[in-house]
């Protein structure tokens, strides 16, 4: 019985995360380790919102803390035209710079 409850709870958690439109933290390909995940869900949501506004929409793929170019957050966004960019934001969620995603730049 415990196993069924655990599985049901895990499935419910996955569904709830998907329904909330959650953004994955940096995936294993570009993950800079635990330090790059030093933020709250509210901070990740605010960074995602600012990045999507700056790019005119798209899909936020990941959020990380960042220190390049004076940024605090980096949000990887796949824009509506299919290109992927890194949106770097300061601690007030203002855009510092938008750059082509370095992991995507060789695939075009």
Image (cartoon, rainbow, N blue to C red):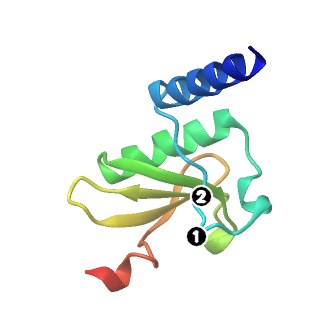
Front in this rendered view, residue 29 or 46 = 29
Instruction: Check disc 1: other Cα within 10 Å, few if <14, some if 14-19, many if 20+.
Output: few
Q: Residue at x 61, y 19 (%)?
A: 8
Q: Is residue 29 left or right of residue 76?
A: right
Residue 26: % across, % down: 59, 58
Where 35 sits versus 32, above or below? Answer: above
- What SS does tag 1 mark? loop
Instruction: Check disc 2: other Cα within 10 Å, few if <14, some if 14-19, many if 20+.
Output: many
Which of the numbered marks, if any, corresponds to residue 92? none
Q: Is residue 37 left or right of residue 82?
A: right
Residue 78: % across, % down: 34, 57
Front in this rendered view, residue 78 or 87 = 78
Name the residue furthest bottom. Answer: 106
Residue 10: % across, % down: 64, 27
User: Which quadrant does the N terminus fall into?
Assistant: top right
CA distance separating discs 2 and 1: 6 Å
User: Which quadrant does the C terminus fall into?
Assistant: bottom left
User: Label 2, on which residue?
Assistant: 26
Name the residue furthest left. Answer: 81
User: Label 1, on which residue?
Assistant: 30
């Amino acid at each position: 019985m415990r196993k069924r409850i655990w599985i049901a709870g895990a499935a419910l958690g996955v569904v709830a995360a998907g329904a909330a439109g959650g953004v994955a933290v940096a995936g294993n390909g570009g993950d800079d380790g635990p330090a790059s995940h030093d933020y709250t869900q509210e901070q990740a949501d605010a960074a995602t919102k600012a990045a999507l506004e700056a790019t005119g929409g798209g899909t936020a793929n990941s959020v990380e803390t960042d220190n390049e170019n004076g940024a605090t957050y980096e949000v990887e966004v796949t824009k509506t035209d299919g290109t992927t960019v890194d949106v770097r934001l300061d601690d007030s969620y203002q855009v510092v710079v938008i750059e082509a995603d370095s992991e995507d730049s060789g695939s075009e």
